[in-house]
Amino acid sequence: MSHDPLHGVTLKHIVQHLHAEYGWAGLAERVPVKCFQSNPSLSSSLKLLRREGWAREQVESEYVQLVQREDSNPLIDALKRGEPLNPGSVSQTKAQQALAWALRHGTRTEALLELLSAIQDVNFWPDSEPFPLLNQAIEGSAPAAFVRELLRRGADVHDSRFWLPLLHTVDVEGQAYKTKSRAPSTELLDLLLAHRADPQRTDSRGHTALDIAQAYGLKAFIHKL
């Protein structure tokens, strides 16, 4: 029996799921409509998509493609169904993809740790993923217990392939503070510093973590850096 990914799924769920996977910027690249490009929000997006059928069709198409990719990975499929995981049954690339997906979609800490236990090289960066694993954890504000285990397993605190993790952490917390989406936390910063992340390291623009903290006015971060 064929399965229609859109059957019984609300537009609100579709937009929320796509946003969790791609973020507003990534969604705007895939579906270049104003509600994703300018001051995006769930409510404004739903309003436009319910009015503009052509835009809704594009969004639904993106959702179907995403669901088909998710369902092709046994671990992601199991996570979505709430079924037991068997991380050792898939390739390292699929295990990495499943873990990155789980981080983006707010999966419970226990499942994150179970998936992490199957990863042989925590610094491996699959071509299909936008970030190395440590940066993905930072971007998704992963639980401290997961980041702690990731660092214990040897995640490189000075990996600059995407962005130095210390700078990335300060920027993520600064964005949370700026948008008032949540209170900024120094928990991941403390973990990185405890694993000897160097606050003096700079990115390609010459910025340090302290520079970023000062730009956002993050007093607790400035004090620690």
Image: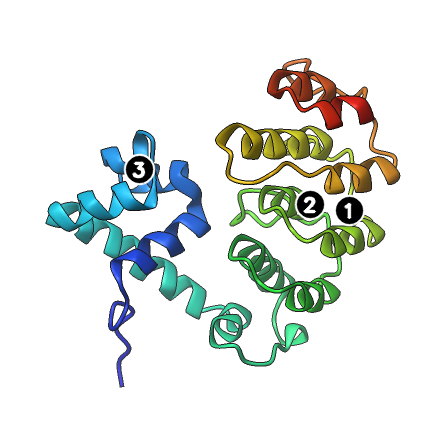
Q: Callout 2: 10 Å neighbours few (<14), some, many (20+)?
A: many
Task: Determine which residue is flagged by label 3.
Answer: 36
Q: Secondary structure at mark 2?
A: helix
Q: Please report whichever mark, 1 or 2, sits nearer to the chain's N-terminal start.
A: 2
Q: Is residue 217 above or below residue 67?
A: above
Q: Where on the picture, by quarter, is residue 174?
A: top right
Q: Secondary structure at mark 1?
A: loop
The answer to whether residue 125 is seen in the rendering is: yes
Residue 97 in the image, given as x and y percentages of width and height: 56, 58
Kindly identify the residue that appears in the image at 33 percent across and 46 percent down.
Answer: 42
Q: Where on the picture, by quarter, is residue 118?
A: bottom right
Q: Residue furthest top?
A: 206
Give residue 155's mark.
1
**Horizontal relation, residue 104 to residue 214: left or right:** left
Kindly identify the residue that appears in the image at 21 percent across and 49 percent down.
Answer: 58
Residue 64 in the image, given as x and y percentages of width and height: 30, 61
Residue 75 in the image, given as x and y percentages of width and height: 55, 71
Question: What's under tag 1, amino acid-wise?
Answer: Ala
Q: CA distance from mark 1 to mark 3?
A: 33 Å
Q: Are marks 1 and 2 in contact (CB under 8 Å)?
A: yes
Question: What's under tag 2, amino acid-wise?
Answer: Leu
Q: Please report whichever mark, 1 or 3, sits nearer to the chain's N-terminal start.
A: 3
Q: CA distance from mark 2 to mark 3?
A: 27 Å
**Horizontal relation, residue 171 to residue 40: left or right:** right
Which image quarter holds the C terminus?
top right
> Considering depth in this image, is 190 or 3 the residue closer to the camera?
190
Kindly identify the residue that appears in the image at 41 percent across and 62 percent down.
Answer: 69
Q: Is residue 4 above or below residue 101?
A: below
The answer to whether residue 225 is seen in the rendering is: no
Which image quarter holds the N terminus?
bottom left
Q: Is residue 85 above or below residue 106?
A: below
Q: Please report whichever mark, 2 or 3, sits nearer to the chain's N-terminal start.
A: 3
